[in-house]
Image (tube, grey):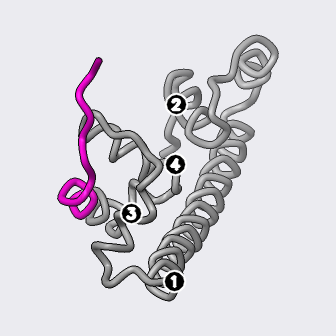
Amino acid sequence: MEFTYSDDCFSDLHKDVYGFRPRGVLMDEWNDRTPRQKQELWNALCDQLEENTAREKKIEEMKVDEFKERIHQAQTWGAHDYWDALRWITGCETFYHIQDVEHFVWEQGILFTKYGQQLVEDLAKVVEYKEYA
């Protein structure tokens, strides 16, 4: 039994892989394919998505290591402990809300990691929130 991929499924997968939905010529090419050709393209897109996911995971791991090194460096320069290092690292930042903390962690490239989520919780305990003027 052969599965028939809908235009919507193809569009969703294409967006997951490349960051945009296919339109125009790309959709025309999809519609002009035989079921076997659609399956081949589908498989290729799935393979690319796996590669993208693995690469993104490696980048996140590298970014976590970089941030941990920043904490270590701050302690080497005189921060008394982990909490003090976090204060040093965020000392020039302005935070009005927890979303600003999340944004800071997102800018580090680690928000969607387990470490990043813990970092948000830790930073929320040490940053000083400013009042809106």
Q: Residue at x 29, y 60 (%)?
A: 117
> Which x, y percent locates residue 112?
39, 55
Tell me whether circle 1 and circle 3 mark residues in contact (CB < 8 Å): no
Task: Point out the stretch of residues depicted in magenta.
Answer: 121-133
Q: Which residue is mark 1?
A: 77
Q: Earlier in the sequence, mark 1 or mark 3?
A: 1
Helix, strand, or loop for circle 2?
A: helix
Q: Along the line of sight, which residue is nearer the eye, 129 or 9?
A: 129
Q: Along the line of sight, which residue is nearer the eye, 62 or 83?
A: 83
> Dot 1, crowdedness within 10 Å: few (<14), some or many (≥20)?
few
Q: Which residue is mark 4?
A: 107
Q: Which residue is mark 2?
A: 12
Residue 17 on the magenta segment:
no
Q: CA distance from mark 1 to mark 3?
A: 27 Å
Q: Earlier in the sequence, mark 2 or mark 3?
A: 2
Q: CA distance from mark 4 to mark 2?
A: 26 Å
The kind of residue on which mark 1 rests is Trp
> Which x, y percent locates residue 45?
66, 47
User: Quarter holding the C terminus?
Assistant: top left
Front disc: 3 or 4: 4
Q: Earlier in the sequence, mark 3 or mark 4?
A: 4
Q: Residue at x 36, y 67 (%)?
A: 86
> Dot 4, crowdedness within 10 Å: few (<14), some or many (≥20)?
few
Q: Residue at x 26, y 35 (%)?
A: 130
> Dot 3, crowdedness within 10 Å: few (<14), some or many (≥20)?
some
Tell me whether circle 2 and circle 3 mark residues in contact (CB < 8 Å): no
Q: CA distance from mark 4 to mark 1?
A: 23 Å
Residue 79 picture quarter: bottom left
Q: Earlier in the sequence, mark 4 or mark 1?
A: 1
